[in-house]
């Protein structure tokens, strides 16, 4: 138990120091957060992402390729999806769906097909 706490503290400290080092390298706070999130995302075990390449996760920014109007699901009821909150829309990525913030492209939720 004590070893887990020590390891958790070391991981947390390394992320803080890595963020500080990246900030000194001229990266914006948003870029640093995306890089750290990308690292965290790859540490997930057994979790599949959405999309044909399974590389879209909650918190990621949807790639420009899928931010085109042709992928937006206007008839969400027909696809058995819930109503998107104001400022969001459903996007079909391959056989999966992502709830995406319209303004930023940040993925709020993913629904995977089985």
Image: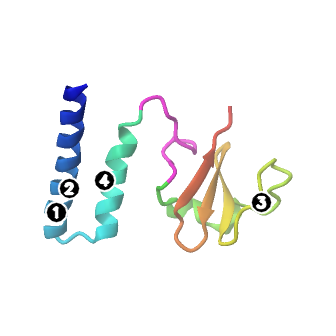
Q: Residue at 58%, 60% (x, y): give it.
A: 66
Which element carries disc 2, helix, strand or loop? helix
Task: Say which residue label 1 marks.
Answer: 20
The residue that mark 4 highlights is: 36
Judging depth in this view, the residue of 97 and 14 nearest the camera is 14
| Secondary structure at numbered mark 1 | helix
Indicate the quadrant containing the N terminus: top left, top right, bottom left or bottom right.
top left
Tell me if label 2 and label 3 are in contact, CB under 8 Å. no
Q: Position of residue 96 (x, y in %)?
A: 65, 44
Left or right, 45 with reference to 65: left
Which residue matches tag 3?
83
- The mark nearer the N terminus, 3 or 4, is 4
At horizontal 20% and vertical 55% (from top left) the residue drawn is 16
**Pointers 2 and 4 in contact (C-beta within 8 Å):** no
Q: Which residues are magenta?
A: 45-58
Q: Which residue is mark 2?
A: 16
């Amino acid at each position: 138990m004590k070893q887990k706490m020590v390891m958790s503290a070391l991981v947390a400290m390394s992320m803080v120091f890595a963020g500080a080092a990246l900030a000194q390298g001229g990266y914006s706070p948003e870029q640093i957060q995306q890089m750290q999130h990308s690292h965290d995302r790859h540490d997930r075990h057994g979790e599949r992402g959405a999309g044909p390449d399974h590389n879209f996760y909650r918190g990621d920014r949807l790639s420009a390729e899928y931010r085109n109007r042709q992928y937006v699901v206007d008839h969400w009821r027909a696809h058995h999806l819930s109503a998107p909150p104001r400022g969001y829309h459903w996007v079909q990525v391959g056989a999966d769906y992502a709830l995406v913030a319209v303004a930023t492209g940040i993925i709020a939720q993913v629904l995977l097909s089985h």
